[in-house]
Amino acid sequence: MPDLRFSSSPPQHTEIPRAKRAEGQWSLGYTEPLNKNEQSKKDDDPLNVRDRILYTYSKRGFASIDPADLRGRFRWMGLYTQRAPGFDGGKTAMLEEEELDDEYFMLRVRSDGRLLDHRAVRALGQIGVDFARDTADVTDRENIQYHWIRIEDVPDIWQRLDDAGLSSLEACGDSPRPFLGSPVAGVAKDEIIDGTRALEEIFDRYIGDPAFSNLPRKFKTALTGHPSHDVCPETNDISFVGTVHPEHGPGFDLWVGGGLSTNPMLAQRMGVWIPLDEVADTWAGVASIFRDYGYRRLRSRARLKFLVADWGIEKFREVLEKEYLGRELVSCPSPASPVGHRDHIGVHEQKDGKRYIGVAPTAGRVSGTLLVQLADLIEEFGIAGARLTPYQKIVLIGVETDVVDQVLDRLDAIGLSGRPSQWRRNTMACTGIEFCKLAIVDTKERARALVGELEKRFPDLDTPITVNVNGCPNACARTQVADIGLKGQLVMADGEQVEGFQVHLGGATGLGANFGRKLRAHKVTSAGLDDYITTVVGNFLADREPEERFA
Ligand code: SF4
C-alpha cells in the first residue's frame, strides 16, 4: 500500500479516466493552477501561515497581513474575517466579499467528537469571555465558533486551546474539516461499535499533514457507531456508519459523496465493510482520491460529490481498492435502517448505568459565560464531560443517577434545557448576516424569535418538525433536509426588496432521506415567517393521519 501520508505526487494509475474537458485534476496532469484559489495554495502551503500569524501579524497588527493570507490561508487556521457592520443583504449582493471585511475574525475550534472535560469546557468559555465579547456558538459541525477575535490575541488563544487539548487547525479551508463523531460514543447502551479510536487516529495522522492541506475544496468527515446514525452521514463527503457484518461482526459501512449547498446530493453507500483498525487508512485513501482526481477548475464543482456522481460508485470503489489500498475491501450487505432520534436530547441510561443528558441551547447560541457555568456544573457534579452534536446541541456524559434531577434544574437555570419544547429542540440556524460575509438575511436572532413565538402558538406540539434557518444558498444549516428548510434571500414585499426565505418543504435524513420540495410560491418575508409556519403546521395538524410525520 502506498504511504498516503507523505505522497507528494499522485500514484501511478491502473486506468486513467478520460475527462470530457480538463477540470484541473492533478492525476490527469493538470497541475497548473486554473483559478486564484489554486494559485494561492500552490504559491505557499496554507499551513505555513501559522508561523506568520504567531510571529509577525499578531505583533504588527491587522494592517500588516498579506491579503493572500487574510482571505485565503487564514482559513486553514480556522480564521475568517467577519462581516463589517452596516451592510444589509441588498448591499451584500453588490459588493465583493473583501469589501465586507471587518478587522475582527471569526474563529472555529474543532471538537471532532471528543469528550470535553470540565477543564476543556472552561477553557472554551473563558476564551469567549476574554477575547470574543462573550460569543461562543455551537455549530452543526461540532465546533465552537467565536466572533470579534483580534489578530493580536490569536497566540494567547491558541496557547489556551493547546493546553486544553483543542485546536482550530484546518477548521476551515480546502482541507479535512472538523469531524462529526457520535456524541454518545462509548457510552450508549444500544451502540454497535465505539469509533472514538478511529477518529483520534485520523486526527493524529492527517490533520496538519501537508499531504492533505491542498484538497480541491473542503472535505467533511462523519463517523458513528450509534444505530440512529446521529452524525447526519447523508450530507458528508465521507461517512463511516456502524453496522454488523454477518460474518465479520461490528465495523463500519462506508458512504461517500454527500453534500448540500446549491447542488445537493445524498451520500452513496459503497457497499463495503471497514473494520475499526482500517478506518484511518480507508479515510486516507478516499481523501487521496479527492486530492488527486477531484475537480479544481471551478470552485462550484470542486467537491467529492461531483466525482462520485460522474464515476459511479463501482468505479470509485475500484480506484480506491486498486490504486490506493492495494487490496479488495470486504463487501457489506445493506445495513439496518437507522432507528431512534438522532439528537440525544433528554435523559438516557448508559451502558455503565450512569446517565447521559442532551440539552438544547436555542439555535446553537451559547456564550463564553454560559460555557464557564457549564464547566462549573460538570466539575461540581463529577460529570465526565460534554460532547457537541451535529444538531447544535450539547450532551453531558457520565451523570450519576442520584443527581440527575439536580443537574436538570441547574441546566434549566443557566439556559440549557434538557426538557426543551419541540420547537427549541428541532430548530437550527447558521451564522447569518450578523457575522457571515456571504449572508443575505439574519438567522440566529430570527430563529430565536421564531422558537419563542411557535412555543406560544403550538405549546403542546407532539411531533418533531425540524426548522433549519439559513442565511444564503450555501446551506450551512442543511436547508434541504429539514421538514421546513429556509434559504435566505431577498424577496419582494410592497414593491421593495426585503429579507426573506425560499422555503423547502418535507426534507429528511435517516429512513426515507430526501430533499425538501422547493415550491415557487413558497417564498416568505422574514417578518411573515411566524405566520407562514403557523399556517403550514396548522394545516398539517388538522389533516394528518395517526402516526403521520410532517415529512
Ligand atoms: Fe453564511 Fe450562508 Fe453558510 Fe449561513 S448558509 S453561514 S449565511 S455561508
Image (cartoon, rainbow, N blue to C red):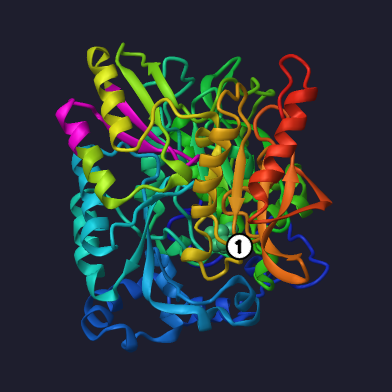
Q: Is residue 546 left or right of residue 37?
A: right
Q: Nearer the viewer, residue 32 or 51?
A: 51
User: In the rendered view, would you say 62 is above or below 195?
Assistant: below
Quadrant containing ligand 1:
bottom right
| 86 inside magenta stretch | no
Q: Position of residue 85 (x, y in %)?
A: 45, 75
- Asked whether residue 106 appears in the rendered view, the answer is yes
Helix, strand or loop status at disc 1: helix
Using the rendered view, name the quadrant where residue 56 is placed: bottom left
Quadrant the C terminus occupies: top right
Magenta segment, which residues?
376-398
448 relative to 192, above or below = below
Q: Is residue 544 left or right of residue 385?
A: right
Rendered position, 225 above or below 91 = above
Q: Is residue 186 visible?
A: no
* Amino acid type, callout 1: Asp
What residue do we see at 23% from left, 57% from top? 129
Badge 1 is on which residue? Answer: 292
Q: Where, by quadrant of the figure, is residue 466 drawn?
A: top right
- Image location (x, y in percent) of residue 519: 83, 49
